[in-house]
Image (cartoon, rainbow, N blue to C red):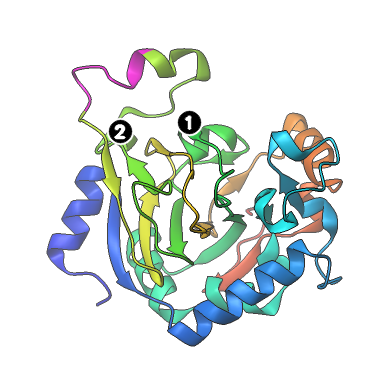
């Protein structure tokens, strides 16, 4: 079994689970190099529309190193074999199977760059609220530390048990976070190569990175193959606006188990 009874209980009660090491030093170094190649335009197999800059650099600023301008890169697992290999790693997928069941698909991935000196805050949110096109909303994400993640450089902070409250609309977030009925936030520091699993409805945030140290983290979002995809119009529009492509061009990658007709 990939998880102990105590680990399963921790996830069920808190909606997240800090986990051990899943990447070797060699794998980490290869991913760091590849991320830098993509940012610098040296990996043409990854379309440049999946590279998003921090707001401060979207006007063509060139004095700052390009690597320190990027906020995140998305859908790398669909284009790059190194990142796809991480999404398929047995050490990760075995845990996902215990949490989601044997039939698993990849929704998407995001390499959060949190650049040194310039990485900005990502405020409190639930991933699944941004994905209303799925039913049920029971995704599980694996957040893999590519560099050491600390409080100082913007590690993940979780709101224990918040996944039990269901989707909270954007307008109600301020009323929910900090409510005395909700647990206090817990920062989760991770050494490079280790990971954190969390439910799609668990509230989380990351701080800014004013330090001289990079804090890259790969978020891989999984869902059950039996999930219904509603294909709502707003989702297709958002993907075209953000990525230049509709959802259908990615076709939910099968990671393990079976596919089901009429599902994702």
Residue 34 seen in the figure: yes
Task: Name the spot of residue 137 as percent of width and height, x first.
Answer: 47, 41
Q: Main secondary structure of the magenta part?
A: loop
Q: Residue at x 75, y 55 (%)?
A: 66
Q: Residues within 10 Å of mark 1 (few under 14, many from 20)?
A: few
Label tally? 2
Residues at marks 1 and 2 touching, judged by CB atoms closer than 8 Å = no
Residue at the spot of label 1: 123
Residue in the image at 86% along x and 70% along y: 44
Residue at the limit of the structure toward the left, as seen here: 6
Q: Is 10 located above or below residue 137 in the figure?
A: below
SS state under label 1? strand
- The answer to whether residue 181 is magenta is yes
180 relative position to 137: left or right: left
The mark closer to the camera, 1 or 2, is 1
Q: Neighbour class for label 2 at 10 Å: few (<14), some, many (≥20)?
A: many
* Point 66% across, 53% down: residue: 68
Horizontally, is 124 left or right of 181 in the view?
A: right
State the quadrant of the N terminus: bottom left
- Residue range highlighted in magenta: 175-182
In percent of width and height, residue 145 lies at 44, 63
**Residue 85 appears in which quarter of the rendering?**
bottom right
Residue 261, disc: none
The residue pinned by badge 2 equals 162
Q: The C terminus is located in which quarter? A: bottom right
Front residue of this view, candidates 145 and 57? 57
Q: Nearer the viewer, residue 231 or 6?
A: 6
């Amino acid at each position: 079994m990939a998880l102990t009874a105590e680990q399963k209980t921790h996830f069920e009660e808190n909606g997240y689970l800090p986990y051990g090491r899943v990447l070797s030093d060699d794998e980490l170094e290869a991913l760091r190099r590849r991320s830098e190649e993509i940012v610098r335009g040296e990996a043409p197999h990854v379309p440049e529309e999946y590279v998003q800059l921090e707001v401060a650099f979207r006007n063509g600023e060139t004095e700052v190193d390009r690597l320190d301008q990027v906020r995140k890169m998305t859908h790398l697992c669909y284009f790059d074999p190194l990142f796809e290999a991480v999404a398929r790693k047995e050490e990760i997928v075995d845990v996902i199977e215990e949490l989601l069941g044997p039939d698993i698909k990849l929704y998407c991935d995001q390499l959060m760059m949190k650049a040194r000196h310039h990485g900005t805050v990502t405020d409190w949110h639930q991933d699944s609220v941004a994905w209303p096109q799925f039913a049920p909303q029971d995704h599980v994400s694996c957040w893999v530390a590519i560099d050491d993640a600390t409080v100082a450089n913007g590690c993940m902070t979780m709101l224990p048990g918040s996944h039990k409250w269901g989707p909270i609309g954007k307008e109600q977030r301020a009323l929910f976070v900090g409510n005395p009925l909700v647990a206090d936030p817990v920062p989760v520091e991770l050494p490079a190569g280790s990971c954190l699993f969390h439910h799609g409805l668990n509230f989380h945030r990351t701080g800014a990175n004013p330090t001289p140290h990079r804090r890259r983290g790969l978020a891989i979002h999984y869902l059950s193959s039996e999930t219904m995809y509603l294909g709502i119009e707003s989702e297709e529009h958002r993907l075209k606006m953000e990525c230049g492509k509709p959802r259908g061009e990615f076709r939910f990658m099968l990671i393990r188990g079976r596919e089901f007709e009429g599902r994702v």
